[in-house]
Image: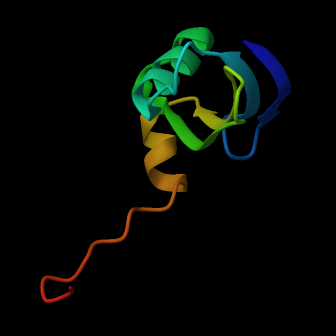
Amino acid sequence: MKFTLNNYNTLLHRHDVIVRNVYPSNPGYNTVKEDVAKHFKKTVDCVALKSVKGSFGSNEFVIEARVYDSAEKLAEIEPKPKVKKEGAK
């Protein structure tokens, strides 16, 4: 893992991180979350991924993530996913 950006935001109790990492194939969000959580010695519940981007022909992926101090802080700060209406197509 090569860190491009690693800032700690004291107001929001989180690390804002941009990481470059090499994977043999396209990693899923769960794999990336586990790797970032393991590096910061946190649980997977404390990591919010913003994006995972790769370029064609390269095994290097750029990961934007937010690592919170606790899962409670993540729950109160991160936006909730939208719920679809029952009648929507």
- In the displayed orientation, state which residue is furthest to the front: 57
Q: Which colour scheme is used?
A: rainbow
Residue drawn at x 56%, y 13% is 24
- Is 10 on the left-hand or right-hand side of 81? right
Tell me if residue 15 comes above or below residue 84 in the rendering.
Answer: above
Residue 65 in percent (x, y) is at: 64, 37
Number of numbered labels in the structure image: 0
Depth check: give the residue in front, 47 or 84.
84
Q: Camera-side residue: 81 or 22?
A: 22
Q: In this view, does 18 lie above or below 3?
A: below
**Front residue (pair 1, 79):** 1
**Residue placed at 67% from the left, 20% from the top?**
59
Give the farthest residue toward the bottom: 87
Give residue 82's quadrant in the image: bottom left
- Would you identify the image quadrant in which residue 89 lies? bottom left
Say which residue appears at 54% left-offset and 54% top-offset: 77
